Image: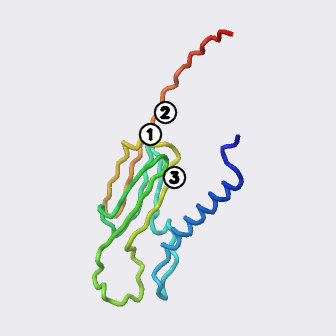
Amino acid sequence: MSSRGTTSETVVRFFERLGRQFADASRMWGPAMPYGRWVSAAEAMPIDLVERGDEFVVTVDLPGFERDDVDVRVAGRTLRIEVESDAVIDGEKERFRRRERGHGSTRRSVRLPEEVDVEGVSARMTNGVLTVTLPKLEAEDARTIDIEESDQ
């Protein structure tokens, strides 16, 4: 039996994924003003993913956000980063003619190349740059399996 599922299940999963992508994309539109523009998730939260021996290091640019604005979670092989800021902007009553600086919230999920040790993950934030260190999960030692003799 195939692990891929039936054609109808595949189509349903495709449309669910497409719906999530459209929902995420709709949150990425700039303000409804003459100079608003489309911002992709990668532009909103650019990352670098580096493999260093027995760990992965993810670096994320989050200018304007504080440590308390950031939520980092790891589940399986997925790193999820969410940022939300309720900061009051100076001159909030001003009429902006152009507003490009990031405020509000955004999120990004990164699929990791290998399983990681969830308990060993650490994160630090310095000058608007988040660095997440994810130690690789150590492969279990190979074990020899004894084969029992059959009575037949």
Find numbered disc 2 in the image and state the secondary structure of the residue it sits on. Answer: loop
Q: Earlier in the sequence, mark 1 or mark 3?
A: 1
How far separated are the C-alphas under marks 1 and 2? 11 Å
Is 95 placed above or below 115 here? Answer: below
| Front one among 51 and 133 | 133
User: x and y percent of residue 151 in the render?
Assistant: 65, 9
Residue 111 numbered tag: 3
Q: Residues within 10 Å of mark 1 (few under 14, many from 20)?
A: few
Q: Secondary structure at mark 3?
A: strand
**Kind of residue indicated by mark 3:** Arg
Is residue 50 rendered to the left or right of residue 119? right
Say which residue appears at 43% left-offset and 53% top-offset.
Answer: 58
Q: CA distance from mark 1 to mark 3?
A: 17 Å
Tell me where residue 40 appears, x and y as whole percent.
52, 70
State the residue in front, 81 or 148: 148
Q: On the image, numbered disc 1 is attached to which residue? A: 54
Q: Residues within 10 Å of mark 2 (few under 14, many from 20)?
A: few
Identify the secondary structure beneath mark 1: loop
Return the mark for residue 102.
none
Q: Residues within 10 Å of mark 3 (few under 14, many from 20)?
A: few
